[in-house]
Amino acid sequence: MGAELSSESNQPEVSLAWWKTFRKVVRVLASLKLAVVIIIALGIVTAWGTIVEAQYDALAAKKIVYNSIWMWGTMISLIVSLTAVMIDRWPWQKRHTGFVLAHIGIIILLFGSWVTQRFGIDGSISFGIGEKQKSVILGETDLAVYSTFDGSQFTKLFDREVDFFLKPAQKKPLAIEIPNGAIKIVESLPYAIREQKFVESTDPKSGVAIRFQMQNPNVNITEWMLQPSKEGSETKDLGPAQVLIVANFPRDFGGRNAILFRPVDNEKLEYNIHTARTRDVKKGFVRAGEMIRTDWMGLEFRLLKYMPQAKEEITYRPVDKPTPLTTAAIRVEYTAPGQTTVSHQWMGLNSLLKLFGTSEAYVVSYANRRWPLGFDVKLKEFRIGRYQGTLRAASYESVVTLPDGSDQLISMNEPLKHAGFTFYQASFESDPSGRPTASVLSVNKDPGRGLKYFGSLLIVLGSLHLFYLKRRAWMQGPRK
Amino acid sequence: MIGVLSMKNWIFTALILMMAGPVWAEGEVGRDVKAKEGMEALKRLPIQDSGRIKPFDTFARETLQLVYGRTSYRPPERSSEKGGEGYDKAEGEKRDRRARPAMEIIVTWFLAPQFWDEQQIVEIKLAALKEALKVELTRDRFSPRELVANDRIGLVLQDLAAFRETKAKLTPYYQAVARLENQLGMYQAIKAGTILRIVPPTLEASAQKAEREKADPLLPKEPDMWRSVAEVDGPLKESFSVVAKAFIRELPGGEAPVDGSVPRLQDAVKSFMELARAENPTLYPDGKDIGIEVHFEELHPFRLAWIFYVLAAIAISAAWISNRKGLMTAGWALSFVAFLIHTYGFALRVYLTGRPPVSNMYESVIWVSWGTILFAFFFEWKQKTKFVLLSGAIVATLCNIVADSVPHVLDASLQPLEPVLRSNLWLTVHVLTITISYSAFFLAWALGNLGLGFVIRGDKATSPRIEAINIAIYRCMQIGVVLLAAGTILGGVWADYSWGRFWGWDPKETWALIALLGYIAILHARLSGWVKQIGMLMGAVVSFNLVIMAWYGVNFVLGAGLHSYGFGAGGVEYMSAFVLVNLAYAGYAFMLARSRDAAKS
């Protein structure tokens, strides 16, 4: 793919001194040695990107490397070098065809990529079967704060794109002004695992929390349960049996296996065990550390911990590397209007946080940006085809319904084009048994596509021409 | 199963005598032609496994490979401590250690598990896993009994399950645990017969399925699950039990009952297959493809090919040293024979899988070496230096030997395709173009090493040999760059079509680009006069490391990105050692050439 080094092109008849200087500068920039350095630099920068991707993920590689100043610098140097070498060879001759085509092709390809990056849309939509979506989720993240007095009318106080990945909040906290108070993002984690904890609460309206173990030779389950409020109830379904915390016992329990608990005081709970087979109800009291025998397959129930007033606390534990379970998270510092004490709460990406003042409330939203499609898409069906006699997937396909009522099939390698957007089958989500629950489509709009294809075509044609020039050298026999 | 189960106890005693005693040693002698034909028939019994119908022989080889780490079984030198009576009897006599075919072993796992439970057949290589299990570090194989009884194994497997919950990539340790889980699972499933799916679903079941699919034309084709030995009953079960008895009869040392109640194996298999076919004639294979697959496995074409490539390389080297024309003709002929066998093996594989054979590392190694030979033929024909064909033969030998000898890294089994790779022209064109460019670079690499060898032995940069090698390397790089550029762009087109973006800095595509940049840099440096003859030799050797990274490294070292269907593990230490030794060799040659230049001036 090399160009001819010789450049005995005739200098045009220009007497101006600046023209000579220009040609001199161009000659330096067109140097092949400089080109080699730039090519190697590009190789090194992109290699670094793949290592970052292997250690973290594609998003990290994009943010740290591919959108970095290093990458931009090498790319711009490359374009300058490619342009300079073409100017330097001016006026072009027939034998320059391949070299010019290949170099212009590369410039057009890079320009097309920039157009895609700047004006294109690259996002995804995820929906369960039967659900509708009307916007695409993009990679950018936004932080917004709303205030409300009645819970139905919201006023937007703040809305801005944030990038805590490159600018962690612990280095540069983000402060949001609210009347007489403050909301401050003081810490951010790029990769964190959500953890749920139950802690003692001082609020007299809080419900109880229990931690229990159910055990027989085949089963061993340990779970937490939290009653949402003093009057509320909570149910945990454990397959063949249910565990409930209730404020009052019902008379009958519809012939299911269930253990029902009712808080009595700070020490003990009252229980009713309903056995489906015998329709028996066993009653009694239990304290932390005590064990109850059930009549179901020898299951024993042990109350491990009892908190008479408890609340749920969400924390995020930082981890070094992303996995499918990690999310980005931020810590919000809140100073309620007119107060001096501050409270801290964690929130994950794509969630809402409610903060209460004396008469008003604030809602903080930290989420990926949504881009309106301009129409609705509904997931009608999602299916996985399997290879014979295995669980190995052979194909994935989604059937979506468009606003005109038509059903369209989107499968791996068979995208759907509609209203300027292209929808591709990207992946799916499934429940623990492997049954698909949601389909993930990647959605994009690429205005740079034509340029990239045209540039690629020129590169290929140029390379072929360079090859054609060498045909004699190729066809000759051994050199004497 | 009663018939088969009652058989099992009898076989247990029989096997102990056979495996441990001198009876087995009589081996092949005791077998008549009919016995061999019977075994051949059983090899061709169709079985459904891992998403396709395959010959029983292939299933047995793959299973033994997974559990035992080899495709044939070699009885141990010393019997295990719990060898039983049979062992004591055999003591003092020389034991036969000839390898037993996989099929005999797998069938007897099912028929006589009591015997195999005690044999050291489960391969564990990773020391960390052996430590975790608190077993002897000096052994590589353990008996199913001792592993099941191991008090740490439950914890180790639970630990794996917990690690999987985190959805993080499996580390080599967890990969080894996952393999152990598979090994034990596979052994158990064969013992119980649940994985021996050798009877197609009934016509009724197929018809119901067809009905469901007809009712909803969008419904993807659901699998036709075959029935296992454990599931069938009635005449099919009885027929299989006859197959089992006949199988025992044909084993070395097996004897026909006097009353003639047990038929020859060939007849027993035939009548079983007739019964199975009658269950669902359309789903039951006609035996042609099964026969071809058995032929492919037994011919082992790629091993045969490398033997001929080695001979070709020897002939060419001899021709070069002695300068005799006849030897060079022999070199050409031998490499051509090797190439024909290589191509034949390839054609069989393509026929059997019904797709271009570049969907995993093993296949790409075979394909790239095929391309290297093709380029070597062309350039040798043009240039007539002997070095090009020699380099080609060396690369082909190297690739085919590696493909043949590290089955745990390069999986040779025929596997169904991942969804993203199914039936697409662009994919085929893109992968074939990129990998064939690797062939050209591989040839340049071998030529470069050869040239550096000449430099070490005192050749000057201007010597005719170095000159000739330089021309060949330059041609290889040119054609490689054009193919790699075109292939990378085609990959972009394919990615745009399939994933919705032309370029996404995916590690696989990025490394293909980096390799391309590396060679473009060399070609430009050559134009600028930065790189001269010896520099080109160096360039051919050093840049090939970029190809290794793009080809092997992304899948086996980085293991990230969208090309995950080709990911694998293992061999990293060998590959790194190979790369380091090669770089040291190239560096030494380069320094030597430079010091000579300095001395001259």
Image (spheres, rainbow, N blue to C red):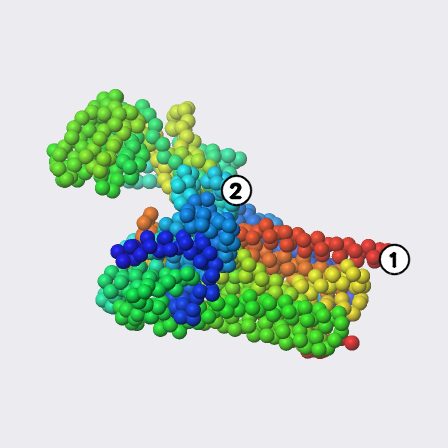
**Which element carries disc 1, helix, strand or loop?**
loop
Identify which residue is drawn at 27% across, 63% down: B238
**Residue B111, position as x, y percentages in the image:** 35, 56
Q: Which residue is mark 1?
A: B601
Left or right: B408 as drawn, with respect to A278: right
Decide which of A242, B303 is in the foreground and name it: B303
Identify which residue is drawn at 16% across, 30% down: A282
Q: CA distance from mark 1 to mark 2?
A: 59 Å
**Residue A172, position as x, y percentages in the image:** 52, 36
Decide which of B286, A39 is in the foreground and name it: B286
Image quadrant in which the C terminus of chain B is located: bottom right
Identify which residue is drawn at 38% across, 28% down: A337
**Residue A231, position as x, y percentages in the image:** 21, 30
Q: Nearer the viewer, mark 1 or mark 2?
A: 2
Label 2 crowd bin: few (<14), some (14–19), many (20+), radius 10 Å: some
Residue A177 in sight from this viewpoint: no
Amino acid carrying label 2: it is Leu
Identify which residue is drawn at 78% across, 76% down: A480
Sequence order check: which comes first, mark 1 or mark 2? 2
Q: Are marks 1 and 2 on the same chain?
A: yes
Residue A239 higher or lower than A419, as above or below: above
Q: Which residue is mark 2?
A: B137
Amino acid carrying label 1: it is Ser
Return the mark for residue A135.
none
Decide which of B360, B485 is in the foreground and name it: B360
Left or right: B125 as drawn, with respect to A415: right
Mark 1 belongs to chain: B
Left or right: B184 as drawn, with respect to B485: left
Mark 2 belongs to chain: B
